[in-house]
Structures are given as C-alpha cells and as structure tokens.
Amino acid sequence: MTLTHIIPVLRMFDEAKAREFYCGFLGFTWGWEHRDHNGPLYAGVTRGEVQVHLSEHRGDHRRG
C-alpha cells in the first residue's frame, strides 16, 4: 500500500471564525461544504496542494 497524501480533519466550533482564520488569515479557499438539514457543517479548504477538512460534528476528534 502506498499513501500519497493525508487530509487532516480539524474540529471547528464557529463557521464564521473558521472562515476568517483559514481564508482571511491563512489564505485558504473555502472549497465545499456539506450540512444535513441544518445539522453540523463539514467543509473543505485548500491552499495550493494543501487540503484541510473542517468539522462541526460533535464527537469527532476525541482526545485520547
């Protein structure tokens, strides 16, 4: 098995603040988003070849 790239999924708590930080401060482009019936947001941002997924889903990314 050969791994070619990894896309981290990072927790976000506020969409507006996430957009401000990733797009306004770090220079990413908000690429896509998915939300079921006004539920938690799952989105992707890119900058060049770098991709990061952002999630509002509760229970994602538990410590430990």
Image (tube, grey):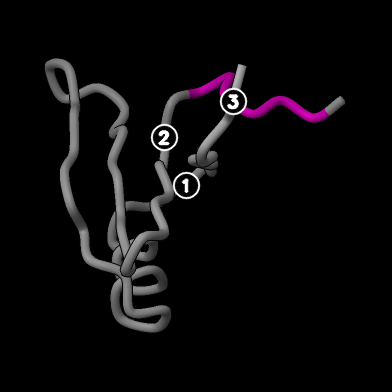
Disc 3 + disc 2, Cβ < 8 Å: no
Q: Which residue is mark 2?
A: 56
Q: Label 1 sits on what residue type?
A: Met
Which of the image's four quarters has the N terminus? top right
Q: Label 3 sits on what residue type?
A: Thr
Q: Position of residue 54 (x, y in %)?
A: 41, 43
Q: Label 2 sits on what residue type?
A: Glu
Residue, x 19% and y 26% (percent of image)?
35
- Left or right for 39, reference 58: left
> Which label's residue is closer to the chain start, 3 or 2?
3
- Left or right for 22, reference 36: right
Q: On screen, 7 above or below 3?
A: below
* Element on which disc 2 rests: loop
Q: Which residue is mark 1?
A: 12
Residue, x 18% and y 52% (percent of image)?
31
Disc 2 + disc 1, Cβ < 8 Å: yes
- Residue range highlighted in magenta: 58-63
Residue, x 16% and y 25% (percent of image)?
38
* Element on which disc 3 rests: loop
Residue, x 59% and y 25% (percent of image)?
2
Q: CA distance from mark 2 to mark 1?
A: 5 Å
Q: Which residue is mark 3?
A: 2
Q: Which picture quadrant has residue 33?
A: top left
Residue 10 versus residue 18: which sits nearer the camera?
A: 10
